[in-house]
Each structure stands twice: as C-alpha cells, then as structure tokens.
Amino acid sequence: MEIVLLGTGAADGWPNPFCRCGSCLDALRRGEVRGQTAALVDDELLIDCGPEVPGAASRHGRTLAGVRHLLLTHAHSDHLGPQALLSRSWVPGSGPLEVIGPADALELCRPWIGPEDPVHLVVVAAGDRLQVGAYDVRVLPARHRVFTDGDAVLYDVTGPDGARILWATDTGPWPGEWFDVVRGAGFDAVFLEETLGDREDISQAHLGLDRFGHMIRSLWAAGAVDDHTEVVAVHLGHHNPPLDQLAVRLAEHGARPGADGELLVCAEGDS
C-alpha cells in the first residue's frame, strides 16, 4: 500500500497565516508550510478532501484522475471541500466515483453533483464494514462531532496486499471500551491526529501531546500497535512547539511528525 500525505496540518494549517507566534514563525523560516490533512492511497483511494487538497496533489506531483473512492471522516470544512466534485465533473470521461462517509457529510456533497455525474454516495456509521474496491474498510468511532454525536468517523483500511492502516483524525481521547474494535489489529501504520500540542485545554475533541501519548499506549495495550507499526502524527497545528522540539517529544511516544508530500510504502508485517 502506497500512501502519499497530501497535507498534515490542522484546519488552519501550520503556520496559521494570521499568526506571529514562535511556532508559526519557525515554520515560516523553515519553509515548512502544512496544508489540510488528507491522504492518497495507491492513487485510487482519497481520505478526506478539504478545499486545499486538490491543489496540494498537483503541487506534490500527483494526479487525482485515478481516484475511484473518497472516504470522508466528517463535514468540517478542512476535511470536506465538496466543490472538488464540480471540478472533477468538468473532465470528460472522468469515470465513476464512490463517496463514502457520514450522512451529514454526504448531504453537503449533493448540490455539487450533476444529474449525469457517475458519483455514488454511500452512507456509513461507526461499526460498519464494507468492501471499497480492493480495500476492506472498517468504520470506527471518533470522539468528535460537527452537528450531532456520531457524525464523525475514523477508518481502518486493509489493502489488497494485506497492509493495514489506521486513519485517526479528527478525534479526542477514546474511552477504554472503544479500543476493543482494534484489538489485535497490528497496524502497519497509524496516522493519528496531534492538533493541540500543549494546549489541550482548548478542546476535548482533539489530541494534544499528552493525550496523543495516552492514545498510543492504549493502542499498544490493545495490540493495535506493535514494534513494526509506523506511527505518524498528522493534523498538526501551531499550538505545538517548533518542529525540532516536537520531533523529540513525539519520539518519546514512538512517533514522528508527518510531512506534506511524503510517501510511505506499507507492506503487511513490515519492520
């Protein structure tokens, strides 16, 4: 399974373009500008599509022309820019597209789909399991909401080669019983949000560094993470310390920050 991170930033990216905090200024000096978090899997499956994502794909030398499945986690605007469906419709012969996600997210897509567009909407909720092309997709709960409880989800995706990943943004800390749904998964890669850095007081609907660490320890205890799992922090925001410091602190949890445009190749049981 080949995963390209089209973005690794929080809703406002990192740096926040309106901010002069030390973390944002450090990112500007480095030229480390992170866009809205999304991933392209095997050039076929797209996970989330905020308004910046189509342009990010082009800037990173990728095309979305082969995407046949779009997994949406929820309807917040950094994860869903439905106008991309209109842009796609302007390409003759673009082919069928399956858009999968919570009901509220799909409702936002409907006005952007023409009557002749071969776009199929599939409503899912936590607990569902479905075949998405060659991918086995389990829909997991998220401690997050847009309008009502349950209208945000996470995804457990197994590819045709057996590689298995956890896409876990956006979410706050899971209650203990939720880890049963991934018990023994032994993920090859985990993409886990770490939005808040040292400002976990801001929201219960996201992870900061302390909650991120607790989540990883709980995934280890459940056998969802093990020695071969690559743990990548995504949905990074400017409440985090500058990147050098962040990398050290994530390493304490066996993780590292993701980078926009990076390519990860996961194979079943890789070490």
Image (cartoon, rainbow, N blue to C red):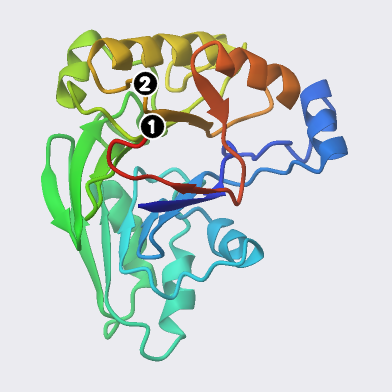
What residue appears at the point 32 percent right and 20 percent down from the top-left corner? 226
Question: What label sits on residue 271 in the rendered view?
Answer: 1
Disc 1, SS? loop
The answer to whether the residue labelled 2 contacts the one labelled 1, judged by CB atoms less than 8 Å apart, is yes
Disc 2, SS? loop
What residue appears at the point 62 percent right and 61 percent down from the top-left corner? 60
Residue bearing the label numbered 2: 227
Q: Quadrant of residue 197?
A: top right
Q: Nearer the viewer, residue 165 or 161?
A: 161
Residue 27, position in %: x, y? 79, 34
Residue kind at label 2, given as amino acid type: Asp
Residue kind at label 1, given as amino acid type: Ser
Q: Quadrant of residue 89?
A: bottom left
Residue furthest to the bottom in view is 92
Q: Nearer the viewer, residue 160 or 166?
A: 160
Q: Earlier in the sequence, mark 2 or mark 1?
A: 2
